[in-house]
Image (cartoon, rainbow, N blue to C red):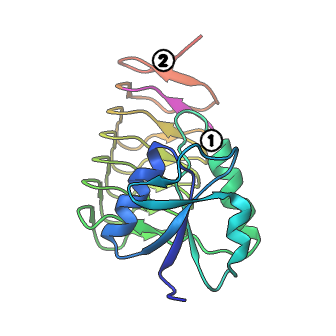
Amino acid sequence: MNRRSAIILGTGGHARVVLATAQAQGYQVLGLVDIKEHPQESKIDNVNILGLEAEIFKYKPQEVVLLNGIGSVGDNRARKQAYLKFKNLGYEFPALIHPNSIIEKHVQLVAGVQVMAGSIIQVGSLIGENSIINTGAIVEHDCELHGHNHISPGAVVCGGCVLGQDVHIGARATVIQGLKIAPGAIVGAGAVVINDISNVGVFVGVPAKEKI
């Protein structure tokens, strides 16, 4: 079997974006699987829904790669759990890079990173495992994003920022240069972060403040 054969976890909206990106990158997508319940449909965009995640075990880890199509809007637990489960079973999650994204020199992408159409990652940045740099998002120079981050469509993380694990930056939010964001923090859509975030919470507004 071709090493670029892939199965996508998830059958929702993010899975469709992952499917389109995988096809643009040249993967042969064998199908999609649902991690929760039996899918109502048999196909997504003319690609078979194989059934539940147990279908993956019909393939050995050396026969197929996995692509994480589970979304993470404000809660990445299902996405993270599925990734860690299959990673620990020996399955590979390669970085998925849309051909219309821009990744500059000296950027490090760890396993499972997804870089969607129109996004930009500037020189010297590190993107941790299973993170999403979504459509049109920008990660500027020398940023360090730990694992399981989601930089939503149109969001901007300015140069030299450090984001802990499990951080969510909402659509069109901005994090100004040189800031640190605590693990598990959520920055709401359109917010502008001008100070470090040192605790778990939801931060909204301009400038961003913790939502009580």
Tell me where residue 68 appears, x and y as whole percent.
55, 58
Residue ID at (53%, 53%)? 42
In this view, the residue in front, 163 or 31, is: 31
| Main SS of residues in magenta | loop
- Disc 2 vs disc 1: Cβ atoms closer than 8 Å? no
Q: Vertical placement of 32 versus 167: above or below?
A: below
Quadrant, the C terminus: top right
Q: Residue furthest bottom?
A: 1
Q: Amino acid at mark 1?
A: Pro
**195 shown above or below 28:** above
Q: What amino acid is labelled 2 in the image?
A: Lys
Q: Which residue is mark 1?
A: 183
Which residue, given by chain and number where applicable, does mark 2 sit on?
A: 209
Vertical order, 142 against 14 (above or below): below
Q: Quadrant of residue 194?
A: top left
Q: Is residue 54 left or right of residue 45?
A: right
Mark 1: few/some/many CA within 10 Å (<14, 14-19, 20+): many
**Residue numbers of the magenta segment:** 183-189
Secondary element type, mark 1: loop
Magenta residue check for 206? no
Earlier-in-chain disc, 2 versus 1: 1
Q: Residue at x 56, y 49 (%)?
A: 70
Q: Can residue 110 be seen from the camera position used here?
A: no
Q: Position of residue 79 (x, y in %)?
A: 62, 49
Query: Which secondary structure lies at badge 2?
Result: strand
* Residue name at image x 67 percent, y 80 percent: 61
- The answer to whether any part of residue 206 appears in the image is yes
